[in-house]
Amino acid sequence: MAKKKIFNDPVYGLVSFKYEILYDIIDHRYFQRLRRITQLGLTHYVYPGALHTRFHHAIGALHLMTMALQVLSEKGIEISEEEEQGVCLAILLHDVGHGPYSHALEHHIINVHHEDLSLWFMEKLNDEFDGKLSLAIEIFKDNYHKKFLHELVSSQLDMDRMDYLIRDSYYTGVAEGVIGYDRIIKMLNVANGHLVVEEKGVYSIEKFLVARRLMYWQVYLHKTVLSAEQMLIKLLRRVKKLLLENVKVFLPDNVKELLLVDFESVDKELIINRYLDLYAQIDDVDILYLIKQNIDSEDYLLSYMCKSLLERKLFKIYLHSEKPSQELVSKYIDLTENGLKINTLTAKNLILVGQESNQTYNTNKDEIRILQKNGNVLSLSEHSLEFLKLDEVTKYFICFPLKPFS
């Protein structure tokens, strides 16, 4: 067993954990890999301090979980030692399936959602740890009868969201993301087997949702961040295309093998048995190596994208409320063709068009529940949501390079 440790977290201060298996998992290579995966992808191109990692976030979410469990226990909610350990393991490993640059490259290296990958990593760890993660897996999958345990891990008010808002706000310096996490946790309770918030905490919940909406458009979907991440996606797609055409590209062998797999035709068992450990070997460092090694590629597009990202010559991006017309796209193709003195096909490949959507709170999913003073439980939308715009917001974007390098 690993010796217990104290972590000095810049957000919460000194934190430690009750169960030794948590430290054994933290020391495992699957988890240590999270030190090399940035929480916010390329957001540091806009907010220079945003260089924290998935490792930081997982430790923080686990700390909030221990706080929540203590509050619930003090309120008389029955939680066994086994259940407490299980839900702590579930939150610790909830993001272990993330790949390089987190959400920026999700589905672009291995076409599987990170939550599915997290579950498969947990199942492999369960074999390695002689079944000690079985309950954690049941909680993670929402198959355990105490539904509030899963809701602490994954819901519209879970320890994951709470930590990333606090932590991302801290590292970006965006004060709008600050929430009263300690008060929210103090207001948690359980009613009818589900996680609820006591009515006197409803204003803290409203602040939490406002903070989340502001953080999405000011940080997570900031237009310059969108531009950088779309460039990275385009770069990786170009690498894959060149590999399929047997064009020489410099990249780590494990990344090359994964990029050449058609995951649409690969079943789950093969991914788990063959590709999951390969995926666990790669992180931000491998992608950065790829970018640095191909600056002087003979392929113009690959070379241009690599140099652009390394030197932060990011594409100009315009946001639109409607999908850009073909006439507008053609205009930017012409500008790029003439400005860079390249052919039309190459110019087309440097124009990036897409869309991003966000919905702050979804009334069609399991809602946040409010426990009234009279003992009744209402959904948040039944209780109070007049202050918040609930409709899904979609923004369309078009990115294009401004000028050639001197």
Image (cartoon, rainbow, N blue to C red):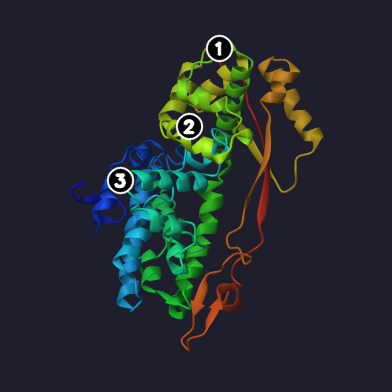
Is disc 2 in contact with disc 1, using a CB cutoff of under 8 Å? no
Which kind of residue does numbered mark 3 sit on? Ile
Along the line of sight, the residue nearer the viewer: 283 or 334: 283
150 lies left or right of 379: left
Q: Nearer the viewer, mark 3 or mark 1?
A: 3
Quickly name the residue at label 3. Answer: 26
From the viewer's perspective, is residue 172 above or below residue 341? below
The tag on residue 274 is 2
Instruction: Provide residue 109's location: percent of width, then percent of height.
Output: 54, 32
Q: Residue at x 66, y 39 (%)?
A: 318
Q: Residues within 10 Å of mark 1 (few under 14, many from 20)?
A: few
Q: Earlier in the sequence, mark 2 or mark 1?
A: 1
74 lies left or right of 247: left
From the viewer's perspective, is residue 72 above or below residue 241? below
Q: Nearer the viewer, mark 2 or mark 1?
A: 2
The tag on residue 353 is none
For label 1, the SS is: loop
Give how far apart the Cα atoms at labels 2 and 1 are: 25 Å
